[in-house]
Amino acid sequence: MRKSRRYLAIGLLSAAFASLVAYAAQPSLQGAPAAGSSTSAAASPRSGSPPSVWVPPRVPIPFPTTPPSPTREEVGDVESFGRPLKWLGVTQIDVYLSRDCAAPQHEDGNCERTDSAFTQFSFQDVGDSITLPGNAAHSLLCHWLSPMLSIEYANPGPEPVTAGLFYSPKLRIQSEVLLDPWLVDPTTGRPFNGSLLTSVSSSAQLSTVVLGGEQRFELQRGTNTCIAGFLTRRQLVETYGLTEAQAAQVFAKPITISMQVHGHAENVAQAQLTLGLRIVGD
């Protein structure tokens, strides 16, 4: 009788343990949605419920602004401000002062004889000119001018004398706009007749004392670069009296540029002046 009760207790414990294991193996029902309920809930969210995907708030993106153009008081030259430099051509002239202009080195004809102690010279439109096509520059033409001068002073007398040389180069600007007979050059009081003369910053005055019977040879060279420009739209309006439209047309049409040089020499036996011209613009 005792053995039967023991077996019965063991059987009850085994059945309880098996039921506990089976219950633990089942999925948790608490909070688990029914089949198909998640799809329908996502497809038809309840009114007022937050969206399932977070959307960031829209932030306005500022557009870049263009800074205002500088004024004439700020930069001095508004028309060319910020524009790139353009290389627009190069040329040179060679002129001579000599006691013998028939020498082979003077065959090009740009020579003035030094017959006396004082010699004046004027060489017009010498060397090769530069012709720029229309719209080659916007509002400014500028020069790089490199003069090289070799000079021989001579004093055949017994007493010291003052010797020296002065030269001044100029540029002639030719444009069909200046052919208008109603346009008058304020610097001359006469019609332009198709061209105007403008100075460049390369004039020079040399002076020295030469002793009696002395001969002296000197060589000088340098480079001058313009600042304001030898031709600008503003200059055409303010100096030469053109309208804004006429000044713009000068730059819109072809321009031909040639060099001149004039001056005088005192107690100079011979001299050679080479002027190298480089033109740049905006």
Image (tube, helix red, strand yellow):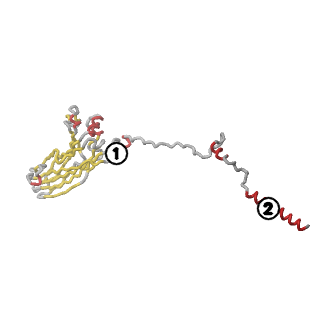
Closer-to-camera residue (196/56): 56
Q: Would residue 227 be visible to someone looking at this image?
A: yes
Labels 2 & 1 near each other (Cβ < 8 A): no
Q: Point out residue 194 in the picture as x, y percentages from the top left corner.
A: 20, 37
* Badge 1 density bin: few <14, some 14–19, many ≥20, Cα 10 Å: few
**Quadrant, the N terminus:** bottom right
Q: Which residue is mark 2?
A: 17
Q: Quadrant of residue 244?
A: top left
Relative horizontal placement of residue 228, taking residue 43 as reference (left or right): left
Amino acid type indicated by mark 2: Phe
**Quadrant, the C terminus:** top left
Q: Point out residue 108 in the picture as x, y percentages from the top left corner.
A: 12, 50
Relative horizontal placement of residue 18, taking residue 5 as reference (left or right): left
Q: Would residue 118 be visible to someone looking at this image?
A: no
Q: Point out residue 246 in the picture as x, y percentages from the top left corner.
A: 27, 35
Q: Point out residue 130 in the picture as x, y percentages from the top left corner.
A: 21, 46
Amino acid type indicated by mark 1: Arg
Give the Cα distance between marks 2 and 1: 95 Å
Q: Which residue is mark 1?
A: 83
Looking at the image, which residue sits at the far bottom? 3
Looking at the image, which residue sits at the far right? 1
Q: Secondary structure at mark 2?
A: helix
